[in-house]
Structure formats: structure tokens, C-alpha cells
Image: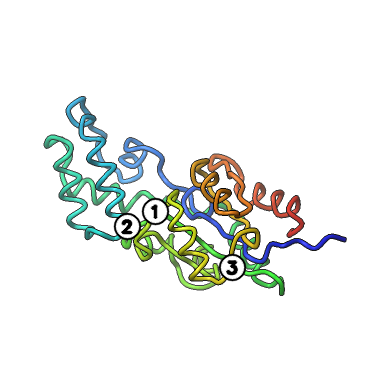
Amino acid sequence: MKTSPIRMVCFDAGGVLVRICRSWQEGCEAAGIEYRWSDAAQAGEPERQMLSDAYQRGEISCEVFFEQMAETTSGLVAADDIRAVHDAWILDEYPGVRDLICRLNHVPSLTTGLLSNTSARHWEGGLMWGGRGVSAVGSVAHPHASHLLGMLKPGQDIYRAFEQQTGFTGSEILFFDDLPDNIEAARAAGWHAEVIDYAGDTAAQTGRHLVESGVG
């Protein structure tokens, strides 16, 4: 029987381990605040993307992020509303993913990792990080986040930084993410990588890919 080269099973967080809001409107509903939008607010989208990237690289604080994001909406949305939506963004944990990670952690030839574009406020929150064995993220053996590494997926530098931090490289890693661009970048780094449909049963999808890869 051919031996699998995979020694590290690595997960994204949002859309794979935890369910998140996928739009501003959904975020407002989760936060219990009125959804408001306008053409003037939409015009600030390029600036919001730059702010979001800087925030997830750990370059600006949470409070600065909320204030500057509010400024991009032409006065339509207050910083307090940005904060409320941000704090409601992580909805819950996908069923079965914690048990899957715990099972993988008990396979002698394997370990688990996480590589997530996120922020300090989300990283330290209860659903995202509930402590070892308490949440899926907390059960991962090698968790790494963009705001701590100072880099973002799908940039190649974050995949190389993850390799340096964990000691696992290239084809030793099997990676799961819900965004095709991140998967393409992982494959370009020499990793095995599979897209997960965030709207489906993420644990079942992951399990099937593990079996196909000779790991499950």
C-alpha cells in the first residue's frame, strides 16, 4: 500500500471550522441592528478593502479600524455599529469539525494546523478561540493567524511563513479553505489543497477529501 506523504492537515477558520456572515446585511441581522446602505457608502469599498487588509495584517488597532471604516460610509454607519457587526460576524462552529480535528490529533503520523486571515478581536473571541479541546480552533495543534504573522492569504509569503513556523513543507501539507484563490495559492506553494463549500457540511467534505488523500 502506498504511504501518504501528508503529515499536516491544515484548516482555514471562517467557512471551514466556523460559520461566518458573508455580507454586511447578514452581519447587521446577526448584530440586531438596522441595515442601512447607499450609493455613497458603496463608493468607499476600495478604501474598506485596504483597511480590512491592514487590520488583518495587524497593522492597525481594532478601535482605529472601526473609526476609519465608519468614515468610508459617508456618515451612514457609526463606528459603534461597525463594532457590533464585527463582533457578531462569527456565528457558530460547524457540526463535527471539532471531533474531526481531535481524531486527526490522535493519529501518530499526523498533526493539525490552522492558517486564517483574521484579526486580534476575532482571534481572542469565544467561538473562534475557546481554549484547547473546547472549540475546533482551540483543538488545532499549530494555529497561525494573519494578524500575528503580518501577512495575508493568498500571498505566497504567508504559506512560507507557516512552513517555517511549523516545520512542515510542500506536499506534507493538506490544506482546506473556502476561497478558491487561497487554494490556488496553496497549490502553487506545493501543498495539497481542496476547496470547501461553506454552505454545506464542511466536516463531511473534509472527511471525504481525507479519505481520497489516503489520510482518513
Image color mode: rainbow
* Residue at 20%, 51% in the rendered image: 66
Disc 1: which residue: 152
* Residue identifier under label 2: 57
Outermost residue toward the top in this view: 39
Q: CA distance from mark 2 to mark 1?
A: 6 Å
In terms of depth relative to the viewer, which is nearer, 201 or 114? Answer: 114
Do the residues under discs 2 and 1 have CB atoms within 8 angstroms?
A: yes
Mark 3: few/some/many CA within 10 Å (<14, 14-19, 20+): some
Which circle's residue, 2 or 1, is located before the other in the chain? Answer: 2
Compare marks 3 and 1 and give the one earlier in the sequence.
1
Q: Nearer the viewer, mark 2 or mark 3?
A: 3
Up-down relation of residue 136 to residue 47 (above or below) = below
Does 81 sit left or right of 176 as displayed? left
Place of residue 131 in the rendered image (x, y in percent of width and height, measured from the top left): 46, 72
Q: CA distance from mark 3 to mark 1?
A: 19 Å
Gap in Å between the C-alphas at discs 2 and 3? 23 Å
* Quadrant of the rendered image containing residue 168: bottom right
Question: Dot 3: what SS?
Answer: loop
Amino acid beneath label 2: Arg
Residue 168 is tagged as 3
Q: Secondary structure at mark 2?
A: loop
- Dot 2 or dot 3: first in sequence order is 2
Dot 3 amino acid type: Phe
Q: Residue furthest left?
A: 75
Helix, strand or loop at mark 1: loop
Up/down of 194 relative to 162, above or below: above
Q: Residue type at mark 1?
A: Leu
Q: Position of residue 48 (x, y in %)?
A: 25, 41
